[in-house]
Image (cartoon, grey):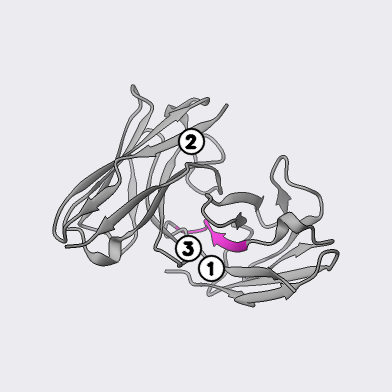
Amino acid sequence: QVQLVESGGGVVQPGGSLRLSCAASGFTFSSYGMHWVRQAPGKGLEWVAFIRYDGSNKYYADSVKGRFTISRDNSKNTLYLQMNSLRAEDTAVYYCAKVGRPTVGDDAFDIWGQGTMVTVSS
Amino acid sequence: AIRMTQSPSSFSASTGDRVTITCRASQGISSYLAWYQQKPGKAPKLLIYAASTLQSGVPSRFSGSGSGTDFTLTISCLQSEDFATYYCQQYYSYSYTFGQGTKLEIK
């Protein structure tokens, strides 16, 4: 079945770095755009970043631009989020999510992972 | 960035009720709108995309309408499993903004 599994979360000090991974299975990963979305404790959903199916274009929320980098390895069916210069306000559950239709960016997120928690604290 | 505003922010209803949640975009987004349901401790689940298309496997009591700037999600006959938080989201622009959420609680 179609599945996304995040990993790599944990506790990190302010200013530190962390890399999240999202392992995909059950679909042709290399044909679909992918997103990262986060949710701070008790808060709503915030889109973080998007990468096209072939990695040719990437887009970021203003709140993470210049600090976070989205990437993918289609040979490993894995999505990544490199997070640098972390701040307390980056504390959240981070979800990866798949675009509904192949090769497009303008579509809803039809499959989500279970999320991985990132805590930025000294 | 396009802002998405949902109303109400929270709502109490009873099983069997018909409920409507509204979502307004700060600029026109055609029909590039999705609705998600989220239960505590779980990932969001896609309910509706393209403003009115029901995602496969979602019960027909859920429906969506609207285009441009004003959208609605309607649940025709609330079931116990529908008490959750609902989010609208635009995917018209590369900011993929979510609404602030509507928490639907049991009266």
- What residue sits right under mark 2 in the picture? A103
The stretch drawn in magenta includes residue B63: no
| Host chain of mark 3 | B
Query: Where does the image place residue A32, in percent across and percent down from the top left?
Result: 47, 35
Q: Would residue A2 appear left or right of A21 to someone viewing this image? A: right
Element type at mark 2: loop
- Give the residue pinned by disc 3: B97
Q: Which residues are magenta?
A: B85-93
**Cα–Cα span, label 1 and label 3:** 7 Å
Callout 1: residue from which chain? B
- Pick the quarter of the image with the N terminus of chain B: bottom left
Nearest the eye: A107 or B43: B43
Which numbered marker is on residue A28? none
| Helix, strand or loop status at disc 1 | loop
Identify which amino acid the numbered label 2 is placed on: Thr
Q: Are marks 1 and 3 in contact (CB under 8 Å)?
A: yes
**Residue A55 appears anywhere in the view:** no
> What amino acid type should be assigned to the residue bearing mark 3?
Thr
- Tell me the mark number nearer the camera, choosing from 1 and 2: 1
Query: What's the mark number on residue B99?
Result: 1
Instruction: Say which amino acid is labelled 1.
Output: Gly
